[in-house]
Amino acid sequence: MRPRKTENRDLPPGMVRRKRPRKNGTVWVGYYYRDANGKELSLGSDFDKARLKWAELEAKAKPADLKIMKGIFDRYARDIIPKKAPRTQKDNRAEL
């Protein structure tokens, strides 16, 4: 089996991402679960909620980073804060 595209490597096994351009120029993103028979079930457009639904469908434990606030804060510090201005980064780290 061929490896996933680099943009989809953050998805768990069996989950696929669909992107559709809209007339107003924005891009709609939806997540789907593909079962063993190839049937796709919609998981929604929010990545975190889609991962929770995926965990329920796979009957696996929920991702640890979505169960406690520490994981949520760690993700915020890792993904969101670096995109902000230096002074805002400093303030956000102090607030965390």
Image (cartoon, rainbow, N blue to C red):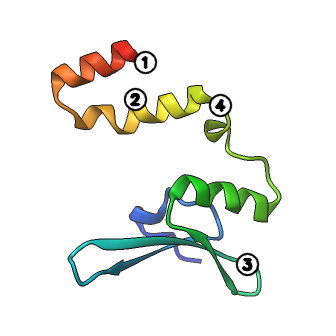
| Residue 14 location (% of width, % of height) | 65, 70
Circle 3 residue: 35
CA gap between label 2 and label 3 equals 34 Å
Tags 3 and 1 touching, CB below 8 Å: no
Q: Amino acid at mark 2?
A: Ala
Please state, as top left, top right, bottom left or bottom right, where the C terminus lies in the image: top left
The earlier-in-sequence mark between 2 and 3 is 3
- Amino acid type, mark 3: Asp
The percent coordinates of residue 66 (x first, y second) are 62, 40
**Residue that numbered label 2 is attached to:** 77
Q: Secondary structure at mark 2?
A: helix
State how far apart marks 2 and 1 are (Cα).
8 Å
Residue with the mark numbered 4: 68
| Residue at the (51%, 70%) spot, across then down | 3
Precedes in sequence: disc 3 or disc 4: 3
* Residue that appears at 38% across and 16% down: 95
Q: Earlier in the sequence, mark 2 or mark 4?
A: 4
Given residues 49 and 75, the one toward you in this image is 49
Q: How far, Cα to Cα, is label 4 from label 1?
A: 14 Å
Asked if labels 1 and 2 touch by Cβ distance under 8 angstroms, the answer is: yes
Q: Is residue 13 left or right of residue 23?
A: right
Q: Quadrant of residue 65?
A: top right
Q: Earlier in the sequence, mark 2 or mark 1?
A: 2
Q: Is residue 51 above or below residue 96?
A: below
Classed neighbour count for the residue bearing mark 1: other residues with Cα under 10 Å, few (<14), some (14–19), many (≥20)? few
Q: Relative to residue 55, is residue 15 depicted above or below?
A: below
